[in-house]
Protein backbone atom coordinates (compact mmCIF):
# COMPACT_ATOMS: atom_id res chain seq x y z
CA UNK A 1 0.00 0.00 0.00
CA UNK A 2 1.39 3.41 -0.96
CA UNK A 3 2.10 5.54 2.16
CA UNK A 4 -0.29 8.46 2.44
CA UNK A 5 -2.84 6.99 -0.03
CA UNK A 6 -6.54 7.09 0.86
CA UNK A 7 -7.41 3.91 2.75
CA UNK A 8 -10.77 2.22 2.52
CA UNK A 9 -11.86 0.60 5.75
CA UNK A 10 -14.02 -2.34 6.74
CA UNK A 11 -14.84 -1.84 10.41
CA UNK A 12 -16.04 -5.04 12.12
CA UNK A 13 -17.56 -4.24 15.52
CA UNK A 14 -18.28 -0.61 14.66
CA UNK A 15 -20.64 -0.09 17.61
CA UNK A 16 -18.11 -1.17 20.24
CA UNK A 17 -15.44 0.68 22.15
CA UNK A 18 -12.66 0.02 19.60
CA UNK A 19 -15.11 0.69 16.75
CA UNK A 20 -15.97 4.10 18.20
CA UNK A 21 -12.30 5.02 18.72
CA UNK A 22 -11.63 4.09 15.09
CA UNK A 23 -14.49 6.30 13.90
CA UNK A 24 -13.07 9.24 15.87
CA UNK A 25 -9.84 8.87 13.88
CA UNK A 26 -11.80 8.65 10.62
CA UNK A 27 -13.67 11.85 11.56
CA UNK A 28 -10.36 13.54 12.23
CA UNK A 29 -8.82 12.46 8.91
CA UNK A 30 -11.53 12.40 6.23
CA UNK A 31 -8.81 12.95 3.61
CA UNK A 32 -7.09 9.68 4.55
CA UNK A 33 -9.80 7.19 5.51
CA UNK A 34 -13.05 6.16 3.89
CA UNK A 35 -15.53 3.81 5.58
CA UNK A 36 -16.62 1.15 3.07
CA UNK A 37 -18.19 -1.43 5.41
CA UNK A 38 -19.55 -1.53 8.97
CA UNK A 39 -20.86 -4.26 11.27
CA UNK A 40 -22.67 -4.68 14.58
CA UNK A 41 -24.14 -7.66 16.42
CA UNK A 42 -27.57 -6.60 17.72
CA UNK A 43 -27.49 -2.78 17.81
CA UNK A 44 -29.30 -2.39 14.52
CA UNK A 45 -30.46 1.20 15.09
CA UNK A 46 -26.94 2.31 16.00
CA UNK A 47 -25.66 0.58 12.85
CA UNK A 48 -28.21 2.38 10.65
CA UNK A 49 -27.21 5.66 12.31
CA UNK A 50 -23.58 4.97 11.42
CA UNK A 51 -24.60 4.18 7.84
CA UNK A 52 -26.35 7.54 7.65
CA UNK A 53 -23.14 9.26 8.80
CA UNK A 54 -20.55 7.29 6.80
CA UNK A 55 -22.54 5.98 3.78
CA UNK A 56 -20.67 2.66 3.48
CA UNK A 57 -21.11 0.28 0.53
CA UNK A 58 -22.05 -2.56 2.90
CA UNK A 59 -23.39 -3.02 6.43
CA UNK A 60 -23.71 -6.33 8.25
CA UNK A 61 -25.80 -7.20 11.27
CA UNK A 62 -24.30 -10.34 12.79
CA UNK A 63 -27.56 -11.52 14.36
CA UNK A 64 -29.43 -12.79 11.27
CA UNK A 65 -32.83 -12.28 12.91
CA UNK A 66 -32.24 -8.53 12.53
CA UNK A 67 -31.61 -8.58 8.78
CA UNK A 68 -35.07 -7.28 7.87
CA UNK A 69 -34.76 -4.45 10.38
CA UNK A 70 -31.43 -3.46 8.85
CA UNK A 71 -32.65 -3.71 5.26
CA UNK A 72 -35.84 -1.75 5.95
CA UNK A 73 -34.02 0.84 8.05
CA UNK A 74 -31.47 1.49 5.28
CA UNK A 75 -34.28 1.77 2.75
CA UNK A 76 -36.24 4.17 4.92
CA UNK A 77 -33.16 6.39 5.10
CA UNK A 78 -32.79 6.25 1.30
CA UNK A 79 -29.31 4.73 1.64
CA UNK A 80 -27.70 2.65 -1.10
CA UNK A 81 -25.75 0.56 1.46
CA UNK A 82 -26.08 -3.19 0.79
CA UNK A 83 -27.41 -5.01 3.87
CA UNK A 84 -25.78 -8.29 4.93
CA UNK A 85 -26.32 -10.59 7.90
CA UNK A 86 -24.87 -13.42 9.94
CA UNK A 87 -21.44 -14.98 10.09
CA UNK A 88 -21.35 -15.37 6.32
CA UNK A 89 -22.14 -11.70 5.83
CA UNK A 90 -19.24 -10.77 8.12
CA UNK A 91 -16.85 -13.04 6.23
CA UNK A 92 -17.97 -11.73 2.84
CA UNK A 93 -17.57 -8.16 4.01
CA UNK A 94 -14.08 -8.83 5.43
CA UNK A 95 -12.95 -10.27 2.08
CA UNK A 96 -14.68 -7.70 -0.15
CA UNK A 97 -12.31 -5.93 -2.57
CA UNK A 98 -14.05 -2.62 -1.73
CA UNK A 99 -11.78 -2.19 1.31
CA UNK A 100 -8.04 -2.62 1.77
CA UNK A 101 -7.91 -2.45 5.57
CA UNK A 102 -10.01 -4.50 7.99
CA UNK A 103 -10.33 -3.45 11.61
CA UNK A 104 -11.16 -6.67 13.48
CA UNK A 105 -12.92 -5.26 16.55
CA UNK A 106 -15.57 -7.86 17.25
CA UNK A 107 -15.39 -9.23 20.79
CA UNK A 108 -14.78 -12.93 21.42
CA UNK A 109 -14.45 -16.03 19.26
CA UNK A 110 -17.31 -14.64 17.15
CA UNK A 111 -14.60 -12.60 15.43
CA UNK A 112 -12.40 -15.53 14.38
CA UNK A 113 -14.00 -16.46 11.02
CA UNK A 114 -14.05 -12.87 9.72
CA UNK A 115 -10.42 -12.32 10.78
CA UNK A 116 -9.42 -15.42 8.80
CA UNK A 117 -11.52 -14.28 5.88
CA UNK A 118 -9.66 -10.93 5.84
CA UNK A 119 -6.33 -12.77 6.04
CA UNK A 120 -7.23 -15.04 3.12
CA UNK A 121 -8.16 -11.94 1.11
CA UNK A 122 -4.68 -10.48 1.74
CA UNK A 123 -5.90 -7.44 3.69
CA UNK A 124 -4.10 -5.18 6.09
CA UNK A 125 -5.68 -6.31 9.37
CA UNK A 126 -5.75 -4.18 12.49
CA UNK A 127 -6.28 -6.90 15.05
CA UNK A 128 -8.16 -5.88 18.19
CA UNK A 129 -9.98 -9.22 18.38
CA UNK A 130 -7.28 -10.95 20.43
CA UNK A 131 -9.47 -14.05 20.76
CA UNK A 132 -8.69 -14.87 17.06
CA UNK A 133 -4.99 -15.19 17.73
CA UNK A 134 -5.46 -16.87 21.11
CA UNK A 135 -7.75 -19.51 19.63
CA UNK A 136 -5.81 -20.19 16.44
CA UNK A 137 -2.49 -18.35 16.67
CA UNK A 138 -0.29 -20.60 14.56
CA UNK A 139 -2.93 -21.03 11.86
CA UNK A 140 -3.65 -17.32 11.72
CA UNK A 141 0.02 -16.37 11.40
CA UNK A 142 0.44 -18.96 8.65
CA UNK A 143 -2.67 -17.76 6.79
CA UNK A 144 -1.45 -14.16 6.98
CA UNK A 145 1.93 -15.20 5.54
CA UNK A 146 0.47 -17.52 2.88
CA UNK A 147 -1.94 -14.91 1.52
CA UNK A 148 0.33 -11.87 1.81
CA UNK A 149 -1.87 -10.16 4.40
CA UNK A 150 -0.46 -7.75 7.02
CA UNK A 151 -1.26 -8.02 10.73
CA UNK A 152 -1.02 -4.97 12.98
CA UNK A 153 -1.69 -5.54 16.66
CA UNK A 154 -4.11 -3.01 18.12
CA UNK A 155 -3.80 -4.23 21.71
CA UNK A 156 -1.79 -1.40 23.24
CA UNK A 157 0.81 -3.81 24.70
CA UNK A 158 1.51 -5.58 21.42
CA UNK A 159 1.37 -2.36 19.52
CA UNK A 160 4.03 -1.04 21.92
CA UNK A 161 6.24 -4.09 21.31
CA UNK A 162 5.63 -3.85 17.57
CA UNK A 163 6.75 -0.21 17.68
CA UNK A 164 9.88 -1.05 19.72
CA UNK A 165 10.81 -3.90 17.38
CA UNK A 166 10.16 -1.76 14.28
CA UNK A 167 12.36 1.00 15.69
CA UNK A 168 15.17 -1.50 16.24
CA UNK A 169 14.67 -3.27 12.91
CA UNK A 170 13.61 -6.71 14.10
CA UNK A 171 13.93 -9.39 16.74
CA UNK A 172 17.72 -9.84 16.80
CA UNK A 173 19.12 -9.76 20.33
CA UNK A 174 15.73 -9.75 22.06
CA UNK A 175 15.95 -11.42 25.48
CA UNK A 176 12.44 -10.84 26.84
CA UNK A 177 9.18 -9.17 26.02
CA UNK A 178 7.74 -7.38 29.03
CA UNK A 179 3.99 -6.86 28.92
CA UNK A 180 2.67 -4.27 31.32
CA UNK A 181 -0.63 -4.80 33.12
CA UNK A 182 -2.61 -2.11 34.91
CA UNK A 183 -3.60 -4.69 37.53
CA UNK A 184 -7.27 -3.87 36.90
CA UNK A 185 -9.77 -2.52 39.44
CA UNK A 186 -8.85 -5.07 42.14
CA UNK A 187 -5.11 -4.56 42.37
CA UNK A 188 -3.97 -5.24 45.94
CA UNK A 189 -7.18 -7.06 46.92
CA UNK A 190 -7.26 -10.47 48.60
CA UNK A 191 -9.45 -13.42 47.59
CA UNK A 192 -11.69 -12.64 50.59
CA UNK A 193 -12.19 -9.09 49.24
CA UNK A 194 -13.18 -10.54 45.86
CA UNK A 195 -15.82 -12.99 47.07
CA UNK A 196 -18.82 -10.71 46.47
CA UNK A 197 -17.64 -8.57 43.52
CA UNK A 198 -20.46 -7.32 41.24
CA UNK A 199 -20.28 -6.92 37.43
CA UNK A 200 -20.46 -3.13 37.86
CA UNK A 201 -17.40 -3.15 40.14
CA UNK A 202 -15.49 -5.44 37.76
CA UNK A 203 -16.29 -3.25 34.74
CA UNK A 204 -15.11 -0.04 36.45
CA UNK A 205 -11.55 -0.03 35.10
CA UNK A 206 -9.32 2.61 36.71
CA UNK A 207 -7.44 3.56 33.51
CA UNK A 208 -9.08 2.26 30.33
CA UNK A 209 -12.60 2.67 28.99
CA UNK A 210 -13.46 -0.65 27.30
CA UNK A 211 -16.26 -3.12 26.51
CA UNK A 212 -17.64 -5.26 29.36
CA UNK A 213 -16.00 -8.55 28.41
CA UNK A 214 -12.45 -7.20 28.22
CA UNK A 215 -13.08 -5.17 31.39
CA UNK A 216 -13.87 -8.36 33.32
CA UNK A 217 -10.85 -10.05 31.71
CA UNK A 218 -8.72 -7.17 33.00
CA UNK A 219 -10.15 -7.61 36.49
CA UNK A 220 -9.32 -11.36 36.56
CA UNK A 221 -5.94 -10.85 34.79
CA UNK A 222 -7.18 -13.25 32.09
CA UNK A 223 -6.77 -10.34 29.68
CA UNK A 224 -3.03 -10.38 30.39
CA UNK A 225 -3.02 -14.15 29.98
CA UNK A 226 -4.69 -13.84 26.56
CA UNK A 227 -2.10 -11.20 25.71
CA UNK A 228 0.79 -13.50 26.66
CA UNK A 229 -0.61 -16.07 24.20
CA UNK A 230 -1.07 -13.32 21.61
CA UNK A 231 2.54 -12.11 22.04
CA UNK A 232 3.84 -15.68 21.80
CA UNK A 233 2.31 -16.03 18.33
CA UNK A 234 2.73 -12.49 17.02
CA UNK A 235 6.40 -12.19 17.90
CA UNK A 236 7.43 -15.85 17.83
CA UNK A 237 8.75 -15.79 21.42
CA UNK A 238 8.60 -18.72 23.86
CA UNK A 239 6.32 -18.26 26.87
CA UNK A 240 9.25 -18.18 29.31
CA UNK A 241 10.63 -15.15 27.47
CA UNK A 242 7.38 -13.21 27.96
CA UNK A 243 7.08 -11.58 31.34
CA UNK A 244 4.18 -9.65 32.87
CA UNK A 245 4.75 -6.70 35.15
CA UNK A 246 2.02 -4.73 36.88
CA UNK A 247 2.21 -1.00 36.19
CA UNK A 248 -0.87 0.71 37.64
CA UNK A 249 -0.40 4.06 35.85
CA UNK A 250 -0.73 2.42 32.37
CA UNK A 251 1.75 4.87 30.83
CA UNK A 252 4.43 2.38 29.76
CA UNK A 253 2.46 0.18 27.36
CA UNK A 254 5.10 -2.58 27.13
CA UNK A 255 8.84 -3.11 26.73
CA UNK A 256 11.47 -5.13 24.91
CA UNK A 257 14.54 -6.28 26.85
CA UNK A 258 17.70 -6.89 24.77
CA UNK A 259 20.65 -9.17 25.56
CA UNK A 260 22.97 -6.18 26.04
CA UNK A 261 20.86 -4.89 28.95
CA UNK A 262 18.96 -2.24 26.95
CA UNK A 263 15.22 -1.98 27.46
CA UNK A 264 13.09 -0.18 24.86
CA UNK A 265 9.65 0.97 25.92
CA UNK A 266 6.70 2.73 24.30
CA UNK A 267 4.88 5.26 26.48
CA UNK A 268 1.74 7.29 26.08
CA UNK A 269 -1.62 8.22 27.59
CA UNK A 270 -3.91 5.19 28.02
CA UNK A 271 -6.04 5.80 24.92
CA UNK A 272 -6.59 3.21 22.18
CA UNK A 273 -6.51 5.86 19.46
CA UNK A 274 -2.67 5.83 19.60
CA UNK A 275 -2.42 2.14 18.66
CA UNK A 276 -5.22 2.44 16.10
CA UNK A 277 -3.66 5.51 14.48
CA UNK A 278 -0.32 3.71 14.21
CA UNK A 279 -1.90 0.72 12.45
CA UNK A 280 -4.13 2.86 10.23
CA UNK A 281 -1.38 5.15 9.01
CA UNK A 282 1.74 2.92 9.13
CA UNK A 283 4.43 3.74 8.08
CA UNK A 284 3.30 7.37 8.47
CA UNK A 285 2.37 8.93 11.80
CA UNK A 286 -0.84 10.93 12.09
CA UNK A 287 -2.36 13.08 14.79
CA UNK A 288 -4.58 10.81 16.92
CA UNK A 289 -6.08 13.49 19.14
CA UNK A 290 -4.44 11.85 22.17
CA UNK A 291 -2.91 14.45 24.46
CA UNK A 292 0.86 14.60 24.90
CA UNK A 293 2.33 13.06 28.04
CA UNK A 294 3.09 15.66 30.68
CA UNK A 295 6.09 14.23 32.51
CA UNK A 296 6.03 17.00 35.11
CA UNK A 297 2.52 15.91 36.09
CA UNK A 298 3.16 12.17 35.93
CA UNK A 299 4.94 11.90 39.25
CA UNK A 300 6.24 8.40 39.70
CA UNK A 301 5.73 5.24 37.69
CA UNK A 302 5.40 2.00 39.69
CA UNK A 303 6.13 -1.59 38.72
CA UNK A 304 5.45 -4.79 40.66
CA UNK A 305 5.05 -8.52 40.08
CA UNK A 306 1.53 -9.84 39.45
CA UNK A 307 -0.27 -11.65 42.30
CA UNK A 308 -0.93 -14.99 40.58
CA UNK A 309 -2.41 -16.59 43.74
CA UNK A 310 -5.25 -14.09 43.93
CA UNK A 311 -5.57 -13.95 40.12
CA UNK A 312 -4.93 -17.51 38.86
CA UNK A 313 -6.09 -16.83 35.27
CA UNK A 314 -2.65 -15.57 34.24
CA UNK A 315 -1.05 -18.88 35.26
CA UNK A 316 -3.78 -20.79 33.40
CA UNK A 317 -2.87 -18.96 30.19
CA UNK A 318 0.81 -19.89 30.57
CA UNK A 319 -0.28 -23.51 31.18
CA UNK A 320 -2.38 -23.40 27.99
CA UNK A 321 0.66 -22.31 25.96
CA UNK A 322 2.77 -25.16 27.30
CA UNK A 323 -0.01 -27.69 26.59
CA UNK A 324 -0.35 -26.27 23.08
CA UNK A 325 -2.78 -27.72 20.52
CA UNK A 326 -6.38 -26.87 21.35
CA UNK A 327 -5.65 -25.78 24.96
CA UNK A 328 -5.67 -22.00 24.25
CA UNK A 329 -8.97 -22.43 22.35
CA UNK A 330 -10.45 -24.28 25.34
CA UNK A 331 -9.15 -21.64 27.76
CA UNK A 332 -10.65 -18.87 25.64
CA UNK A 333 -14.05 -20.52 25.16
CA UNK A 334 -14.46 -21.48 28.83
CA UNK A 335 -13.48 -17.95 29.81
CA UNK A 336 -16.06 -16.42 27.46
CA UNK A 337 -18.80 -18.63 28.93
CA UNK A 338 -17.73 -17.90 32.52
CA UNK A 339 -17.46 -14.14 31.95
CA UNK A 340 -20.93 -14.05 30.36
CA UNK A 341 -22.33 -15.98 33.34
CA UNK A 342 -20.61 -13.59 35.76
CA UNK A 343 -21.97 -10.54 33.89
CA UNK A 344 -25.46 -12.07 34.04
CA UNK A 345 -25.17 -12.67 37.80
CA UNK A 346 -25.04 -16.49 37.46
CA UNK A 347 -21.45 -17.04 38.59
CA UNK A 348 -19.31 -15.50 41.35
CA UNK A 349 -16.25 -13.55 40.23
CA UNK A 350 -13.77 -16.01 41.77
CA UNK A 351 -15.41 -18.98 40.03
CA UNK A 352 -14.39 -17.68 36.57
CA UNK A 353 -10.89 -19.12 37.00
CA UNK A 354 -12.30 -22.39 38.42
CA UNK A 355 -14.48 -22.92 35.34
CA UNK A 356 -11.52 -22.27 33.04
CA UNK A 357 -9.24 -24.65 34.99
CA UNK A 358 -11.87 -27.41 35.05
CA UNK A 359 -12.50 -27.03 31.30
CA UNK A 360 -8.78 -27.25 30.51
CA UNK A 361 -8.64 -30.53 32.46
CA UNK A 362 -11.86 -31.97 31.04
CA UNK A 363 -11.77 -31.24 27.31
CA UNK A 364 -9.57 -33.80 25.53
CA UNK A 365 -6.33 -32.45 24.05
CA UNK A 366 -6.16 -32.26 20.26
CA UNK A 367 -3.41 -30.97 17.97
CA UNK A 368 -4.24 -27.67 16.24
CA UNK A 369 -4.24 -29.14 12.74
CA UNK A 370 -6.89 -26.87 11.28
CA UNK A 371 -9.53 -24.34 12.18
CA UNK A 372 -12.37 -26.88 12.21
CA UNK A 373 -10.62 -28.87 14.98
CA UNK A 374 -10.17 -25.71 17.02
CA UNK A 375 -13.76 -24.59 16.49
CA UNK A 376 -14.93 -28.06 17.59
CA UNK A 377 -12.80 -27.73 20.76
CA UNK A 378 -14.26 -24.26 21.28
CA UNK A 379 -17.79 -25.72 21.07
CA UNK A 380 -16.89 -28.62 23.37
CA UNK A 381 -15.38 -26.26 25.97
CA UNK A 382 -18.50 -24.06 25.82
CA UNK A 383 -20.73 -27.10 26.40
CA UNK A 384 -18.61 -28.28 29.32
CA UNK A 385 -18.32 -24.84 30.94
CA UNK A 386 -22.08 -24.20 30.60
CA UNK A 387 -22.78 -27.62 32.11
CA UNK A 388 -20.53 -26.80 35.14
CA UNK A 389 -22.26 -23.45 35.66
CA UNK A 390 -25.89 -24.64 35.45
N1 LIG B 1 -11.82 -1.69 24.26
C1 LIG B 1 -10.50 -1.66 24.32
O1 LIG B 1 -9.91 -0.70 24.77
C2 LIG B 1 -9.71 -2.84 23.80
C3 LIG B 1 -8.31 -2.82 23.94
C4 LIG B 1 -7.58 -3.88 23.41
C5 LIG B 1 -8.21 -4.94 22.79
N2 LIG B 1 -9.56 -4.94 22.69
C6 LIG B 1 -10.21 -6.08 22.04
O2 LIG B 1 -11.03 -5.59 20.99
C7 LIG B 1 -12.19 -6.39 20.84
C8 LIG B 1 -13.42 -5.50 20.97
O3 LIG B 1 -13.45 -4.98 22.27
P1 LIG B 1 -14.44 -3.79 22.69
O4 LIG B 1 -14.02 -3.37 24.04
O5 LIG B 1 -14.49 -2.78 21.59
O6 LIG B 1 -15.82 -4.59 22.78
P2 LIG B 1 -17.31 -4.01 22.82
O7 LIG B 1 -17.29 -2.58 23.20
O8 LIG B 1 -18.09 -4.96 23.63
O9 LIG B 1 -17.77 -4.09 21.27
C9 LIG B 1 -17.87 -5.32 20.63
C10 LIG B 1 -18.31 -5.13 19.20
O10 LIG B 1 -18.48 -6.44 18.63
C11 LIG B 1 -19.86 -6.64 18.26
N3 LIG B 1 -20.21 -8.01 18.61
C12 LIG B 1 -20.45 -8.51 19.86
N4 LIG B 1 -20.76 -9.83 19.78
C13 LIG B 1 -20.72 -10.15 18.47
C14 LIG B 1 -21.01 -11.34 17.76
N5 LIG B 1 -21.38 -12.48 18.39
N6 LIG B 1 -20.89 -11.34 16.41
C15 LIG B 1 -20.52 -10.21 15.76
N7 LIG B 1 -20.27 -9.03 16.39
C16 LIG B 1 -20.36 -9.01 17.73
C17 LIG B 1 -20.65 -5.62 19.05
O11 LIG B 1 -21.90 -5.32 18.40
P3 LIG B 1 -23.18 -4.76 19.27
O12 LIG B 1 -22.78 -3.38 19.71
O13 LIG B 1 -24.30 -4.76 18.31
O14 LIG B 1 -23.34 -5.71 20.41
C18 LIG B 1 -19.67 -4.45 19.04
O15 LIG B 1 -19.71 -3.78 17.81
C19 LIG B 1 -12.10 -7.48 21.92
O16 LIG B 1 -11.53 -8.63 21.39
C20 LIG B 1 -11.13 -6.86 22.95
O17 LIG B 1 -10.43 -7.85 23.67
C21 LIG B 1 -10.32 -3.92 23.18
Image (cartoon, rainbow, N blue to C red):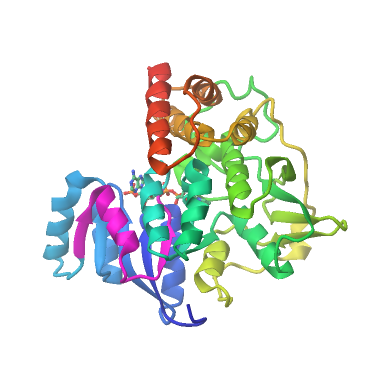
Q: Where is residue 331 in the image (x, y as percent from the top left)?
A: 51, 32
Q: Where is residue 96 in the image (x, y as percent from the top left)?
A: 30, 65
**Is residue 247 found left or right of 348 in the rendered image?**
right
Residue shown at 13% from the left, 70% from the top:
78
Quadrant containing the C terminus is top left
Residue 13 in view = no
Residue shown at 15% from the left, 58% from the top:
71
What residue span does the magenta drawing correspond to? Answer: 82-106
**Is residue 91 found left or right of 190 in the rendered image?**
left
Q: Where is residue 347 in the image (x, y as percent from the top left)?
A: 45, 22
Quarter of the rendering containing residue 319: top right
Please state which of residues 306 and 243 is positioned toward the viewer in this rendering. 243
Quarter of the rendering containing residue 10: bottom left
Asked if residue 101 lies in the magenta stretch, the reply is: yes
Asked if residue 346 lies in the magenta stretch, the reply is: no
Q: Where is residue 179 in the image (x, y as percent from the top left)?
A: 68, 48
Quarter of the rendering containing residue 196: top right
Amino acid sequence: MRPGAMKSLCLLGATGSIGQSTLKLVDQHPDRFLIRALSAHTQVDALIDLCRRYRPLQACIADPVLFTALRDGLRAEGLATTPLAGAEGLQDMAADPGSDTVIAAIVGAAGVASTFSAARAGKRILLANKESIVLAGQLLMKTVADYGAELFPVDSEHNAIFQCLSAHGGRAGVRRLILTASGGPFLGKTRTDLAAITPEQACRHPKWSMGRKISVDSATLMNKGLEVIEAHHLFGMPADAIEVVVHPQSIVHSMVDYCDGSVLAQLGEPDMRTALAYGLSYPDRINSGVKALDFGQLGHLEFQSPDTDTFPCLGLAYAAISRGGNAPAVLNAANEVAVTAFLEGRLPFLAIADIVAQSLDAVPWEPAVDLSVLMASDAEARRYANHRIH
